[in-house]
Amino acid sequence: MKKNGNDGTKALVLLSGGQDSTTCLFWAKKKFGHVETLSFDYGQRHRIELKSAKKIARLAGAGNTAIKIKEFEALKHNALLDKKINLKGRDSVNKKLPASFVPGRNILFLTVAAAFAYTRGIKDIVIGVSQVDYSGYPDCRAEFIRAMEKTLNLGMECPVKIHTPLIKLDKKQTVQLAIKLGAMEMMAFTHTCYEGKKPGCGRCPACVLRKKGFDEAGVKDPAVEGN
Ligand code: ZN
């Protein structure tokens, strides 16, 4: 693949409306000629994420499709889908994982994304997972992504490639990449907070991790009012 090629190839970016997926969108826009985005309405705590994704995609000149996956709502086992569960706690089944772990989420997201990409003749999928600051989610590890890529290739008889530009980056490096890609202005519209607050609550695990990244990179977060 050519660097900054805009070589006519197409890519599909999984866009949650957060900082990481927005950085991936800008990364993809530099790499590919045509970029589409896909967002998932899976019953997450706050609709604001989906609104942010739509707005960011529009401003970046990329199409956005939101797909409903309601099956997760029936789980009611984790803090992202059930407001009664403490976000700072541990997973009720596997204490090594945080309470925000949604089992099978990226497996299902990547499967649906690959099926969507297949119908549009897209062979490159971009997802903003990191195995450095990944909150302990097993479906953010490189090992999982490679296995998933192989599974999708075998199951769909189509050479899908899953790109993970943030996989080896910590939050500081992700902010630095966003600066390099010219994505910082767009960061004002990204949404990270698990509490659905805008600007973020500053206390939930997602806000704390985001603040750490901006602080360590030595830049102000455009999404935080008063900066
Ligand atoms: Zn927060």
Image (cartoon, rainbow, N blue to C red):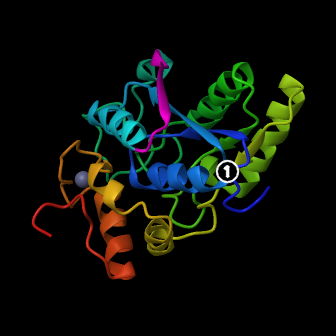
Kindly identify the amino acid type of the residue bearing the numbered disc 1: Asn
Whether 222 is drawn above or below 138: the answer is below
Q: Position of residue 8 (x, y in %)?
A: 72, 42
Quadrant of the image occupied by residue 156? top right
Whether 43 is drawn above or below 183: the answer is above
Q: Position of residue 11 (x, y in %)?
A: 66, 40
Judging depth in this view, the residue of 201 and 101 nearest the camera is: 201
Secondary structure type for disc 1? loop
Instruction: Identify the residue shown where x is 40% and y is 46%.
Output: 99
Quadrant of the image occupied by residue 61? top left
Do we see residue 62 in this rendering?
yes
Query: Magenta region: which residues?
Result: 60-70
Which quadrant, please, contains the N terminus? Answer: bottom right
> Residue beneath label 1, please?
6
Instruction: Identify the residue shown where x is 41% and y is 21%.
Output: 73
Residue 181 located left or right of residue 87: right
